[in-house]
Amino acid sequence: MKVIGIGKNYVNDKSEISAIKTGKQVIFTKPDSSVVTGNADVVFPAITNQLAYELELVIKIGKTGKDISLEDANGYISEIAVGIDYTAKDVLAASRENKGPWALAKGFDGASPISGFKPVANFPDLNNINFDLVINGEQKQVGNTDFMIYNFAEIIAYVSSFMTLKEGDIIFTGTPAAGVGLNVKGDHLQASIEGELLLDFKLI
């Protein structure tokens, strides 16, 4: 299973999209060992003092494909979940000083908690999915897929032009433009899609 992420993929104002949309998507990968499932609590990583959360919808690939056309791309999605793409900001800053990659800052154990998946058939309009994140009882992020710079189909088509997507691969599709912040040990995170609580864990 591959874990793929896309960066900088949401706007606050849809009028901004046309100027930003160059076709050059920001893509990175994470190891499958970063994934946490089953609403298990996440151990706060010892490698960082700046753990940044990013709420994201996660799509699962349902069949193998390469060079997938834009028109066919959504047909490769089997299920959708909600997850947190964690970044160790201090580790990332140190890596950037030497023009290094994002791998360690994004790929540590526990960096990718995800909820259980829902069938894609449950979502009649992929360009109008609401999701949100509550931390310690306070709403921190709210998103809707209509504010994506690159939609699910565009992400799948682009990524598959570089690498074969296989059944079971998952893609973190970007975080809402507002509300990203830092977590501390003891925080309680709850993420929902269309008002249904799906992801519920604590940092321990």
Image (cartoon, rainbow, N blue to C red):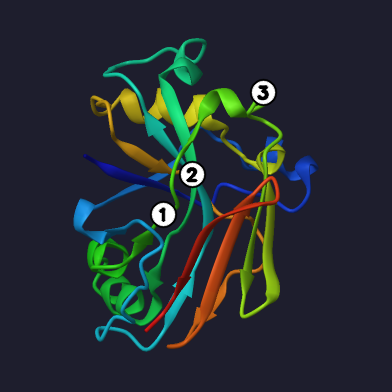
- Which residue is rendered at x = 43% and y = 60% of the image? 85
Element class at badge 1: loop
Element class at badge 3: loop
- Which residue is rendered at x = 57% and y = 66% of the image? 190
Dot 1 amino acid type: Ile
Find residue 144 and report its horizontal and vertical position in percent: 70, 45
> Which image quarter holds the C terminus?
bottom left
Dot 2 amino acid type: Ala
Q: Residues at badges 3 and 2 in contact (C-beta under 8 Å)?
A: no
Q: Residues at badges 2 and 1 in contact (C-beta under 8 Å)?
A: yes
Dot 3 amino acid type: Pro
What residue is shown with label 3?
124
| Residue 50 shows in this picture | yes
Find residue 40 and report its horizontal and vertical position in percent: 36, 66
> Alpha carbon of mark 3 to alpha carbon of mark 2: how far?
15 Å
Q: In the picture, residue 114 is in which quadrant?
A: bottom left
- Which residue is rendered at x = 46% and y = 37% of the image? 24
Point out which mark residue 114 bears: 1
Locate residue 36 relative to residue 147 in the image: left or right.
left
Find residue 80 and report its horizontal and vertical position in percent: 49, 37
Badge 3 or badge 2: first in the primary sequence: 2
Locate residue 192 relative to residue 87 in the image: left or right.
right
Badge 3 or badge 1: first in the primary sequence: 1
User: Which of the pair 75/66 is nearer the observer?
Assistant: 75
User: From the viewer's perspective, is residue 89 above or below residue 49?
Assistant: above
> Alpha carbon of mark 2 to alpha carbon of mark 1: how far?
7 Å
Badge 2 or badge 1: first in the primary sequence: 2
Locate residue 133 relative to residue 199 in the image: left or right.
right
Q: In the picture, residue 44 is in which quadrant?
A: bottom left
Point out which mark residue 81 bears: 2
Locate residue 191 relative to residue 195 in the image: left or right.
left
